[in-house]
Amino acid sequence: MDLLIQLASSGDPVGLPQLSPFDMDDDTESDSPGDTLELSLEQQKSHLQSYLDSLPYECESCEDMQAKLEDIVGKIFICAKAKNWLVLTTWDGMLQCWLLMRYPMDKSIRAKLVRLYYGLCITPGIEPRVIRSWADMITRLLSNKSGMKRKLEYGDLELPWEPLWHSVQTHLWHKARVHDSS
């Protein structure tokens, strides 16, 4: 976790994003069904709004859901900085529920979340069950369906390989030493 805090304060691309309002001007990818490769964020929002208008019950608007997403993401970052894993797991569940509703998410927010969860996954001393749930969240944030535009392009996200390599190396060499001693 110290690596995660250092990266956040150093401005490294893997660090924790600032808890400032989100920039919603970037192009993004919608999770909603029926997306094509050509849809922009505004087109996705208009398609979603026409779908919501056709429902026989009232739903939250895109703006309301973006505000809820900002609140959830802000709480997740606060919990990560405080190392409060139990509460972070609760907010992680809230983010999963938000993703299931298939509202469009800005690429910059998606990339920041993937960076955070990557940093959490390589933090030593965390229960494997919790790390698995964070790794599942990375998969949900990055997964692509065939025929759909990628949620993040190669230039949108770059994660450092060294911390992950050192973590894997420690486990592999530890096991090799155990086998050599017998």
Image (cartoon, grey):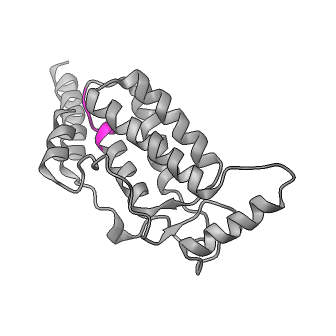
Q: Residue at x 55, y 76 (%)?
A: 40
Q: Quadrant of the N terminus?
A: top left
- The mark tally for this picture is 0
Q: Is residue 109 left or right of residue 33?
A: left
Whether residue 3 appears in this view of the structure is: yes
Q: Residue at x 27, y 46 (%)?
A: 16
Report x, y in % for residue 5: 19, 38
Q: Quadrant of residue 144?
A: bottom right
Report x, y in % for residue 104: 57, 60
Instruction: Indicate whether 24 appears above or below 38.
Output: above
Q: Residue lying farthest right?
A: 56
First to last magenta residue range = 119-124
Say which of 175 and 142 sits in front. Answer: 142
Whether residue 147 appears in this view of the structure is: no
Say which of 151 and 173 sits in front. Answer: 151
Q: Is residue 52 left or right of residue 88?
A: right
Q: Quadrant of residue 77?
A: top left
Instruction: Indicate whether 49 appears above or below 84.
Output: below
Q: Residue at x 36, y 43 (%)?
A: 117
Q: Is residue 26 left or right of residue 68?
A: left
Q: Is residue 122 magenta?
A: yes
Report x, y in % for residue 97: 60, 40
